[in-house]
Amino acid sequence: MRTRRLMTLIAAFLAILMSPAGAQAAPPTWSPPAHLVTGLNQVWQHQEQTYNNGNLYGFRNYGWDQVMANRGYINYCVRWDSSSTVTVAQRDAIHAALARQHKKWMDELVGHNAWPYADVPVRVVGWAVRNRSQLQWNDNSVAVYVNDIRENAPQCSVPCGRFFNQNGQYPNCPGGYARHYDQSLWLTDGFGGGAGGDWGQRMGREYFMNNINAANMTILLHEIGHTWGLDDFYDWTPSGVSNFIMRAGSSPSITEFDAWMFRDWWRHLKSRYGY
């Protein structure tokens, strides 16, 4: 009698799960639109052949490695390579703009192929300047590094930087692990264009400040793409596509093709992190 009742309960529970109201959709995996498949395959093959002397998988400081080491967030330090001053309002606006643009990439992963994070917060933990008087605040919300010059620009603390400590240990970082930074936002007076890599992103200070409220800060979005592994396309174009943000000058915003190139990185690297 008890066995029959148990079987009835199990059957009822399964019926609820299989009903339209209780059904659970399988999470999306690798299912790019058919018209993008050839181009995506070409891109991945090109990256495998050209990155890190043909050893793409041997490199361990992509943005993916950083976010997984942190278990779901990215820390930044701002290199203020400028003679201008910064008010509290400007500081907060810079932090907010960086977070908004970074989120545009992260949102392309949510719910996709076992990606584990619904949100990847950006935390700005430090600023580097030539002169402390340029920063018009006295609170300790961020660490401040003064007149430590590297590459002819203010440098955030080397002992706190992921680029310099790729084992993920920061024993000599003032403030400890909480004040380590994974990437630098390097804003330089008069700098044209942009640069990006595992160390962070660089662009003109004027460009960033003039576009601080823009829906899409195109140069920053492009350079963030590089930090997460996406390639440049100066000398070739994948089949079937022509306008996408990683092909500089062809799109002001992240496109469907950019999003699938980004997801392709997760597809190929996720086993590194146990997914």
Image: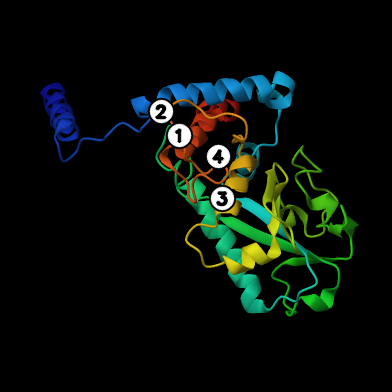
Q: Which amino acid does label 3 sit on?
A: Leu
Q: Is 112 above or below relative to 48?
A: below
Residue drawn at x 39%, y 40% is 111
Q: How crowded is mark 4: few (under 14 residues within 10 Å), some or many (20 or more)?
A: some
- Whether residue 192 is visible here, answered yes or no, is yes
What SS does tag 3 mark?
A: helix
Q: Which secondary structure, mark 2?
A: helix
Q: Is residue 175 above or below residue 31?
A: below
What label does residue 36 carry, if any? 2
In this rendered view, identify the residue nearer to me: 118 or 15: 118
Q: What residue is disc 3 on?
A: 221
Question: Which residue is denoted by mark 4 in the rendering?
Answer: 247
Identify residue for label 1. 260
**Amino acid at dot 1:** Trp
Secondary structure at numbered mark 1: helix
Q: Earlier in the sequence, mark 2 or mark 4?
A: 2
Single out the mark in the foreground, 2 or 4.
Answer: 4
Please tell me which of labels 3 and 4 falls first in the chain. 3
Using the numbered discs, state the Cα–Cα distance from disc 2 to disc 3 in whole angstroms: 21 Å
Whole-percent x, y for residue 144 in the image: 79, 67
Q: Which of marks 1 and 2 is nearer the N terminus?
A: 2
